[in-house]
Amino acid sequence: MRGASRPSFEDLRDQLDAALTSAGQAKNVGDGLFAVAGLLDTEHGLRRALSDPGKPAAEKAAIAGQLLHGKITQVTEDLVVSAVEKRWASSADLADAIEELGIESLARQAEYDGTLDDLEDELFRFGRLVVGQPDLRSALTSGAPAPVKEELLSTLLRGKVTPVALNLINQVVLQPRGRSLQAVLDLCAQIAADRKSQLIAVVRVVSDLSARQRTRLAAALSDAYGHKIHLNVLIDPAVVGGISIQIGDELIDSTAAARLAAVRRKLAA
């Protein structure tokens, strides 16, 4: 995405990362975002109305909220409402952004499941399979009913790829959105690869960090770990003071609560 769409998408991706807390939630959000992207592709008037820069953001948010409330999870609804409030270079960029957030969500599901490496590899291998077998590519891109394509993919892939990969492949096969199947599979694989190069730091503090503090902390951790770091900041009264940072299995804890616990352990020894 370019122009006005790029900062809008980056803001939404940060919102998504902050909102997702489990594999199950990530799957639900991803599935919901794909459904919304499909709706915007079929309802062109709705897509234009929700991305119209001349409409007040509050008006577009109200339309999206009324249309979607109760039909998707609250996190998904909040993301879509935030999306329609932002500026987009074109109406197509709004649908593209929501789809990419769906892919990001399913990649996060794989991250939580510990199958992100598998997802990238499986998407790559399936893409090569599609390229090498014209009959398969034709069957998946034909006008056959969705259940027929789903059955074909299930027969071909179930038990041979992770559930996340099968779900993601199903989503993009059934909603190609005018692109070649190879192009959208490459997009999914690239998003999975980008997630692999980014570490998630869960930061617990007693009160929220300022934007400046977040930027400085992310930069310091990126330098220390040699990877891009995304911060998930949680307000936790149990911290008491200081800061607790968890990256993968590693815990960096300088909280007052941790120091008090250490003192208690020494006293009990």
Image (tube, rainbow, N blue to C red):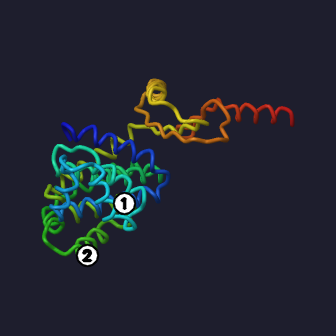
Q: Which amino acid does label 2 sit on?
A: Pro
Residue 195 pos. (x, y %): 37, 42
Depth check, front residue: 181 or 213 = 213
User: Where, quadrant-wise, is the C terminus in this rendering?
Assistant: top right
Q: What residue type is labelled 1?
A: Val
Q: Name the residue under label 2.
A: 147
Query: From this viewpoint, which residue is outermost toward the right?
Result: 268
Depth check, front residue: 126 or 195 = 195
Mark 2 Cα shell of 10 Å, populated few (<14), some (14-19), many (≥20): few
Q: In the rendered structure, find residue 161 and report the number of the disc placed on it.
A: 1
User: Where, quadrant-wise, is the N terminus in this rendering?
Assistant: top left
The first of marks 1 and 2 along the sequence is: 2
Residue 173 pos. (x, y %): 23, 63
In percent of the image, x 30 and y 51: which residue is there? 58
Local SS, label 2: helix
In percent of the image, x 23 and y 73: which residue is there? 146
Q: In the rendered structure, find residue 86 and report the number of the disc placed on it.
A: none
Does residue 169 show up?
Answer: no
Residue 134 pos. (x, y %): 13, 62
Local SS, label 1: loop
**Residue 130, quarter of picture:** bottom left
Residue 4 pos. (x, y %): 21, 38
In percent of the image, x 52 and y 32: which residue is there? 209
Gap between marks 1 and 2 measured at Cα: 19 Å
Q: Are marks 1 and 2 in contact (CB under 8 Å)?
A: no
